[in-house]
Amino acid sequence: MSVVRDQMLCIITPDWPAGNGLLDSAAKASLESMFNDVGVVHFASVALLPPFPGAPEGSLPSLMLELAVDEGIRPKDLLRRLSNHSSGALWILYGAYWMQRQPAAVSRRNRLLFRHLFTGLNVSDGAFVGVRDRTLAQIKQERALLVATRAEARRLRTNGSSGRNELAKALSRWVAQDSRFEWATATAPRSFWRGAGAASSVKLAYFGSIAVIVIAAVWALRGVCRWLLERLDPSTGGVKSLVAVLLNGLEVTATWIIHTSWRAYLFILILMLIYWLVFVVLTTFFPPWRRWLRNVEDELNRPAETWSSRLTYVSGWLVMGLLVILFVNAFVLVVSGKDGHEALFGTAPMGIVRSLRIGCGSWIAASLCGLTSAAVFAGLLVLGTSSVWLLRKLPEPIRRWYKRPSLNEVRCAQQVHPSIECCEADLVVGTAHMISLTDLRRPYAWSAFWTRFVLRSVTLLGRLFFTEGKLGDAPGIHFGHWHLIGGRRLLFISNFDGSFGGYLDDFINGANRGTTLFWRWTRLLARPAAVPGHPEVRTNRSFPPTRFLMFKGVKCELDFKAYARDSMLPHLYRFDPCKLTIDQIDLATSLRDALCGERGNVKDDCIMRTLEK
């Protein structure tokens, strides 16, 4: 995951003293020249972050430099290349920090600049890369190949080559003979996780292999402890006696971990089997169950409060309570093993089983409680499934009352700040861009922990499963990254195709649960504008209410879009060297793959379809 996270950086330096925050045309031209010369930056932007809520009046904003770069570029090396660039573009941007004591020597200036940038460096806490396995140079080369191939195809058609196979072979020969496209004689590079051999079973086996490696390491540790104990004579006292006690403790703990782990893995497999039966098999072969699950999800996601949604929410808490009881019983069984088996109890670290016995009673009593809970849970499932049928039998007025929202308020349309509108207007011909800054809820440590956990999960899933520019059901994301600033703020930056409204609609109608999960821990606190003319937040606002962590939330469409809009900040500068959509980038890569290697009907069809788009 560090490879993905290192691709997206934010350099945040507080108390930027440069006046009204505007960059003149000379500064923007210098930044453009520097990023083009470096040749590894896909996107860059400069923006001002307002001071923390509650900061003293007159506090200065923070300067943010966003960078999305090629894979494999170390952040430290990138900062050196930028700070030492001959144009001095970053000194034009950051030189205001040394307004009173600017060094005369360029080398001294570059060293000061590098240390300043490195101090403010923030590697992303969570990140998603849509354009995988493609450097900026490769994207430009493949785009040039696509343009040149279309021109050559028009020329060949003018000269009479109109057949599909004939035209495809002629284009393939032309690419092989043209010295400009020597690199195109090989297929585009792909990482393992995007290759043909990376099936879903292989990706799932990745997690299983980690579990096996952990158990093997613990097993080896136990073996080493036993081997050392056999060759150590603790009767001599002193250091040897202390070492023997430590080794014995390690061996006992390792033995308990091994025994517990096998039961835990079996428990996880059973849970996976239950999930597969309940949410895959039953939904496939039992339509009433599928309709009931869909109805429950709709009620949990319902933006307005109704009697049906309230009843579903309360029933959900009852079911969650029963599941917690079942989980506690399963945990007791996993940790302690069979009731009364002192060999297994003896291998547990001191106090664990005793505290479990005191808290839960005997395992037999806990098991009876678990069976009772399971029976009640099964009864609730049957009642819930039959309630869908019962509801249809009720008179129409009662059904309308049951589903009618408590509030019929009509909210006004969200007003977009003029500075945000100007930024979006400037990016009409390029890739869209979003900068969102929100505050974490109290307690900060708790919210930061769970937000970071969700973001790491998103990064891992994006690395292994969502490898084609699509995060869940949301397409067209080039680079998206999240940063926890000071443990109190969440900065979200996204580079995406299409409009902002369509971008949010993709998450509302698609990956809404994941979006709710990582934004539910945030809020908008009143904050002044970073500089005059930038947006401010006048009143405190919470994220739309959620249910069971991942329901509702973004499904409150008007509230969510207003929340997202009010959290946005404008950019002062934007660098987009290609101005291509993900579909255009993929199109150029597919043409390259079709032109090289052995010819075939599939490749010929791909060439023809590519040239027609």
Image (spheres, grey):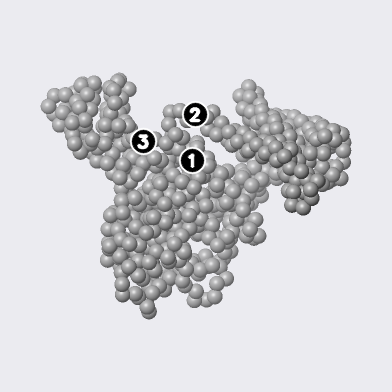
Circle 2 residues within 10 Å: few <14, some 14–19, many ≥20: few
Return the residue found at the far bottom: 100
The three-letter amino acid code for the residue at tag 1 is Arg
The secondary structure type at the circle numbered 3 is loop
Answer whether labels 2 and 1 touch (C-beta < 8 Å): no
- Identify the residue under disc 3: 189
The secondary structure type at the circle numbered 2 is loop
The three-letter amino acid code for the residue at tag 2 is Ala
Taking the spot 79% from the left edge, 48% from the top edge, the residue there is: 236
Taking the spot 39% from the left edge, 68% from the top edge, the residue there is: 112
**Relative horizontal placement of residue 352, taking residue 222 as reference (left or right):** right
Answer whether labels 2 and 3 touch (C-beta < 8 Å): no
Q: Where does residue 438 sit, x and y in percent of width and height?
A: 54, 59
Q: Where does residue 591 sit, x and y in percent of width and height?
A: 29, 32
Answer whether labels 3 and 1 touch (C-beta < 8 Å): no
Which label lies toward us, 3 or 1?
3
- Identify the residue under disc 1: 463
The three-letter amino acid code for the residue at tag 3 is Pro
**Relative horizontal placement of residue 478, taking residue 306 as reference (left or right):** left
Quadrant location, the C terminus: top left
Circle 3 residues within 10 Å: few <14, some 14–19, many ≥20: some
Task: Say which label, 3 or 1, has the lower sequence index.
Answer: 3
Q: Where does residue 425 sit, x and y in percent of width and height?
A: 35, 55
The secondary structure type at the circle numbered 1 is helix
Taking the spot 72% from the left edge, 39% from the top edge, the residue there is: 231
Taking the spot 43% from the left edge, 66% from the top edge, the residue there is: 116
Which label lies toward us, 2 or 3?
3
Q: State the residue in front, 416 or 368.
A: 368
Task: Say which label, 2 or 3, has the lower sequence index.
Answer: 3
